[in-house]
Image (cartoon, rainbow, N blue to C red):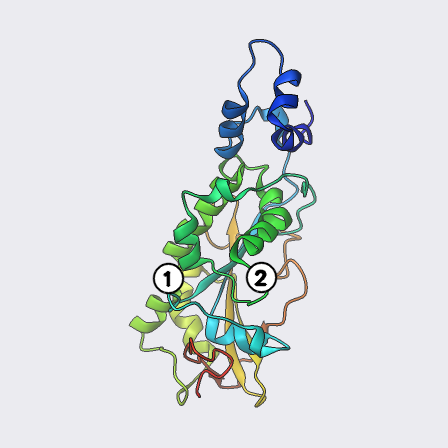
Amino acid sequence: MSRSVLPLLVTLSPALLFLLLPRGSVTQQEMRENYKYGRHSAELLPRSCSWTCMLFTLQWPGGFCQSLFKETQCTIPENISSWTIHGLWPLHAQSCCTCWPIFTSDLQEVEEELKDFWPSLLKTKPCFHFWKEEWLKHGSCAACVEGFNSPLKFFQICLKLRRQFDLYKMLAEAGITPSCERLYKVAELQQVLLPHVGDRHEIQCVRDQQDRQVLFQVKVQLTRNLTVGCSHHGDGGLGPGPSPGHPCPPDAPLFYLPINHQEPWRPCG
């Protein structure tokens, strides 16, 4: 059975699916459960992975809003007070299947935690729409690895990584906290983060309307087994595509702006 058959079966009506299922086969519910928890036949998965390294990217909401062309599109839910997940991206992946569907029911077990650690920060994009985009564009590419081979598994791993890389806590314990007045050098942040995220990471900034460098996101390079510091030849370049962020300049001071829930595009009023 080819890999494309599974998404088709999942989307068929129950009556039609029942007619297509051979005698003695699993029920539709059993098939749905197998799909949800990644209990597939090996034939349904890509035979090999085209990628070796992954990027786990965390964004600072106070900086994300400064990255938008229309800052007023930004929204920061009241429950958000720390770094949030931007995505987990296999680098240079070639075996992706955008036909692999994801349903709201796939994420029921982790939905509340996703809202805390992986919210949409755009007024025009509901949370599930954001998660669906990340699964179809990146999660389906990672599904060639057994631990990522269902939407639920993929998002569970992302949440586990977010708990592991608690950037707010790491920085705060070193006295680096959001402020409208205090300036930092990227070297200060690197010194704090290096023991936790390895030397193959990138701290990114954006320029705000006052042309200041503002802390935006941190990209951590990982291996398939989620250890830090993947350095496979050919996996250079810390990003799956264009990004509004850029590496924070080593000599320019940067702002680590606070979160303003009422007017997130005006972190300092």
Mark 2 closeness class: few <14, some 14–19, many ≥20 residues within 10 Å:
few
* Residue at 39% from the left image edge and 60% from the top image edge: 196
Residue reaching furthest to the left: 173
Which residue is disc 2 drawn over?
125
Residue reaching furthest to the top: 23
* Residue at 64% from the left image edge and 77% from the top image edge: 69
* Residue at 69% from the left image edge and 26% from the top image edge: 2
Vertical position of residue 167 compared to residue 181: above or below: above
Q: Which mark is residue 39?
A: none
Q: Amino acid at mark 1?
A: Asp
The image position of residue 161, as x and y in percent, is 42, 52
Vertical position of residue 180 compared to residue 141: above or below: below
The image position of residue 76, as x and y in percent, is 46, 70
Q: What is the quadrant of residue 5 in the picture?
A: top right
Instruction: Determine whether the residue tagged by mark 2 lies in a helix, strand or loop.
Output: loop
Q: Closer to us: mark 1 or mark 2?
A: 2
The image position of residue 4, as x and y in percent, is 69, 31
Q: Amino acid at mark 2?
A: Lys
Residue 59 visible in the picture = yes
Which residue is disc 1 drawn over?
166
Frontmost residue, 147 versus 71: 71
The image position of residue 140, as x and y in percent, is 61, 43
